[in-house]
Image: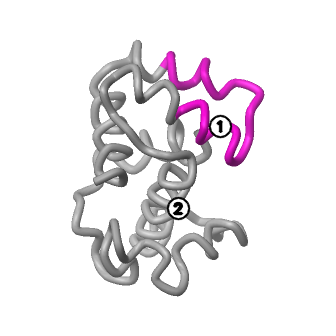
Amino acid sequence: MSAENVYELMKRAAADAALRQRIDAAVAGKQGRDADQAVAELARGHGLEFTAEESFQARAALKQRLAREGHVAGELSDAELEAVAGGALTASLGDTRATLPIPLPMPAQLFLSHFGSW
């Protein structure tokens, strides 16, 4: 359920510019897991529970999907590859090599500009 909460936050933010701004402010100056932790804390204020690791894994799975679909020209980082390799996401997201069971919560470019690296 936690991965679904990450996607729910993304869907809400896609429709709410003020929420996107709060996310941007929460992650300003932060990278990696620190940014994911800041987003997880912000999400709790919106009734959505997930961990920094679940946030990272969900974003990595979406980036992998976007790369497969040709929306991303680059490659996943080593940490992102590790997060989606070997079934790391199978409990919450299913097999990431197949189509994700959760539809992309927003247009690809919106995800990449606001959520690809939090």
Which residue has dot 1 on it?
A: 35
Residue 22 position, x and y percent, is 50, 17
Earlier in the chain: of badge 2 and badge 1, it is: 1
Q: Residue at x 43, y 60 (%)?
A: 62
Compared to residue 118, the image places residue 55 above or below, namely below
Viewer-proximal residue among 20 and 73 = 20
Membership of 25 in magenta stretch: yes
Q: Dots 2 and 1: beta carbons under 8 Å?
A: no
Region in magenta = 21-39
Residue 111 position, x and y percent, is 44, 44
Q: Residue at x 63, y 68 (%)?
A: 76
User: Residue at the top extreme?
Assistant: 18
User: Residue at the right extreme?
Assistant: 29
The C terminus sits in image quarter: top right
The amino acid beneath tag 1 is: Ala
The amino acid beneath tag 2 is: Ala
Label 2, label 1: how many angstroms apart (C-alpha)? 14 Å
Which structural element holds mark 1?
helix
Which mark is on residue 60? 2
Between disc 2 and disc 1, the foreground one is 1
Viewer-proximal residue among 65 and 31 = 31
Compared to residue 59, the image places residue 87 above or below, namely below
